[in-house]
Image (cartoon, rainbow, N blue to C red):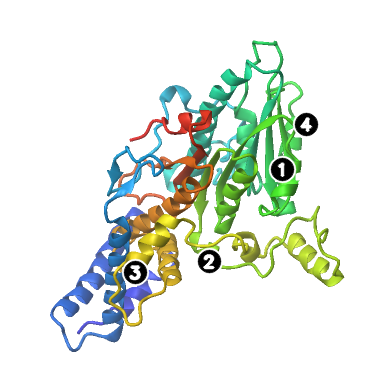
Amino acid sequence: MISATPLLLLLSFDINKHDVRFRSCNERLYSFISNHSNESENNEDPSSSRWQRRTAKRRQRMEELLQSVEDGGLHLLPSISSFPTVHIGTPTLRIPSSSMINWDTIHPDLDPMQGGKINHNANGSGEFQYKNNNRRGLRKRGQVQAFHFILSSILNAYCAKMTQSSGGGVTIIDAGCGAGNLAIALAGLLHLPTNNANDSDINLNILAVDVNNEALDRLSQRVAQSQSMAENTQQLLPSQTTLTTCCADLANHKYIKSQIPPHHDVIVVSLHACGAASDMAMNLAYQCNNAPFVVCPCCTAKSLTKRDVDLISNEDVGNDSTDMKDKQQQRQFIVNPQASRHRSGATSDIQYPRSNWLTTKLSLTTDQEDPPVPLESKYTTLAKVADVGLGPQTPTQQREQQRRAKRIIEYDRLMSASERQYGYDTRLMRIDDQDDDPRVYSYGKGEVLLGALKDSLAANVLLRLPSS
């Protein structure tokens, strides 16, 4: 029997994952391992290793779990029963060419590849080449493009409504904004037209929220530096747009709400807020008068970590506590944002699975194990596979299983919104991978969760976004 261990060691090296030649070799090696393992299992080879039998059993269990949840199909629009179900893939958001951002003509500081310095050439020439590993920058552009199109569609509908009222405005909360690659771009690219009914300006406010004050400082410095250099050139932000920052834990709904200007409609957006932070962003939308949300989650397994304590923000630290030691512990967390387990860990009010739908699905799955696998363990498996897949398999097989698990995790979040007392219309879509090479595997963090109060103006917009 040939040992697969040397091959696994070879594949463990940190080789450029975007090198197509390596990917092809990687596929063949994993295929050999998988086929050899399956062959031993099918022939009941008594000489097959315990590792082979164990991994084959894990793959079988995972496939059974995925199939049990997918049984009957998954709705494209979970909150609308009349829509068809999908067994393969998630619809991709299609942006009309007329709505695409021309990255060559906008202010360079609004471009995440230039202002955000994501994989920008050292000479500042703006020439981005495929071989220079700039896929992260291209993906970030695609994400900004998607959020811009979705929000523009909602804002256009809002403007029509606002012409019948006086004043007002819209606040877009960027929950978990980091150094502002999304917030700055939205502030510079989005705009609300003049209210023709009373000839007054409709104000747009981008509220950038993050628990990491150092990241917010970088955001503010980027904006200030750009504005100071714009005396005789293109201004970074439109005159009716403001960009403000708020250092707060996303769980501190009360404080974040206090930063919203009066008489403003609210939309909550979040791009790659790790783990439970994406759930906190959705909860923030619920607390803001059931506001619409556009959330692109990541790192689902990080949500499995529970926080040691539920903490609020440095503006509100210790207000509800008379214990000085407790205040100091809370402040230590806020001023130490590197504590990832606190940023992305779940607060006590967030439980998984999020929805009755997935809880029921996992409770009904048939178990061959004795004793049966607990519901929490099944969800944990789904969340971990949604992050990294389950090996050893070929990368294509691993990515497909990862996609299926990720889709279930995100449907769980959307179904929890649909099941609320004042239910949401919800939709799951994918952001275009922005990759013109078909041999490159699709990006695993491109799912975008859309939700708005049932039958609302925003819901009507979200449910009609073009897709393929």
Residue sitting at the far front: 421
Look at the picture and state if 126 lies above or below 304. above
Look at the picture and state if 154 lies above or below 132. above
Q: Are marks 4 and 1 in contact (CB under 8 Å)?
A: no
Which mark is first along the chain, 1 or 2? 1
What amino acid is at disc 4?
Ser
Mark 3 to mark 4: distance in Å?
52 Å
The answer to whether residue 201 is seen in the rendering is yes
Question: Which numbered mark, 4 or 1, is in the foreground of this view?
Answer: 1
Which residue occupies the foreground of this view, 304 or 264?
264
Q: Residue 391 shows which numbered tag?
A: 3
Q: Indicate left or right for 275 with 48 as reference.
A: right
Position of the N terminus, as image quadrant, is bottom left
Which mark is first along the chain, 1 or 3? 1
What amino acid is at disc 2?
Leu
What residue sits right under mark 1 in the picture?
Answer: 257
Mark 4 to mark 1: distance in Å?
30 Å
Category of crowding for the residue at label 1, using alpha-carbon neighbours closer than 10 angstroms: few (below 14), some (14–19), many (at least 20): some
Which mark is first along the chain, 4 or 2? 4
Question: Which numbered mark, 2 or 1, is in the foreground of this view?
Answer: 1
Residue plotted at (33% across, 59% down):
69
Category of crowding for the residue at label 2, using alpha-carbon neighbours closer than 10 angstroms: few (below 14), some (14–19), many (at least 20): many
Look at the picture and state if 89 lies above or below 363. above
Category of crowding for the residue at label 3, using alpha-carbon neighbours closer than 10 angstroms: few (below 14), some (14–19), many (at least 20): some
What residue sits right under mark 2 in the picture?
Answer: 304
